[in-house]
Amino acid sequence: MVERVLVAMDDSELSERALRFALDAHPDADVTVLHVVGEPSSMMGAATGIALADDSEERVRELSEDVFERAGEIATEHGVAVAVESEVGSPASRIVERAEEFDVVVIGTHSGSLTDRLLVGNVAKSVFQNAPVPVTVVR
């Protein structure tokens, strides 16, 4: 029986579908939504702004607000509450590291923008190949 579900979310429609799927497929499970803010890159990624912020933890929360607000709306539609967490780093790596604490991971096939898919790579594929627990990929 699935008791703990990790849903990786960004600001894409596909990640919203992943959360809806998780809530429908595992109605009695504890669901945690994880939003990973990108790591520094030569192209001045999101984490560069975090590192320069006066309060880096507050900045991470700010960058996650929209995703968590949407996750809360979806959870409310389903009549449940979800836990929300944010982390900094490579999305695929952070999701895989956290996966061992859960029974299953649910993730959308890709993020919303073409730029993200080209520059970041295929997060879902990496999670699917490396997670220590079953992974459901939602499209």
Image (tube, rainbow, N blue to C red):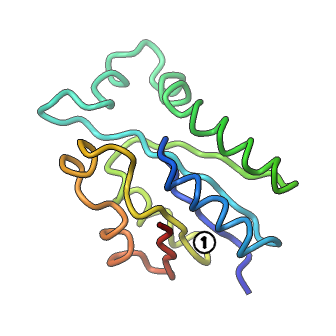
Report the residue at 43% width, 12% height from top: 54
Task: Residue 21: give x, y in percent of width and height.
Answer: 64, 67
- Look at the picture and state if 117 lies above or below 72: below
Report the residue at 40% width, 56% height from top: 94
In this rendered view, identify the residue nearer to me: 40 or 68.
68
Instruction: Name the kind of residue labelled 1 in the image.
Output: Phe
- Look at the picture and state if 82 lies above or below 134: above
Left or right, residue 1 beside residue 129: right
Left or right, residue 40 beside residue 37: left
Task: Residue 39: give x, y in percent of width and height.
Answer: 29, 40
For mark 1, what is the residue? 102
Left or right, residue 96 beside residue 21: left
Task: Residue 110: give x, y in percent of width and height.
Answer: 37, 58
Q: Circle 1 sits in a helix, a strand or a loop, which is it?
A: loop
Residue 50, picture quadrant: top left
Task: Residue 131: give x, y in percent of width and height.
Answer: 41, 75
- Look at the picture and state if 33 lies above or below 125: above
In this rendered view, identify the residue nearer to me: 80 or 42.
80
In the current view of this chain or complex, which residue is farthest to the right?
79
The quadrant of the image that shows the N terminus is bottom right
In the current view of this chain or complex, which residue is farthest to the left?
42
Report the residue at 74% width, 69% height from top: 24
Q: How dense is the environment of label 1, judged by Cα within 10 Å: few (below 14), some, or many (20 and up)?
A: some
- Look at the picture and state if 114 lies above or below 1: above
- What is the count of numbered marks? 1
Report the residue at 33% width, 21% height from top: 49
In the current view of this chain or complex, which residue is farthest to the bottom?
1
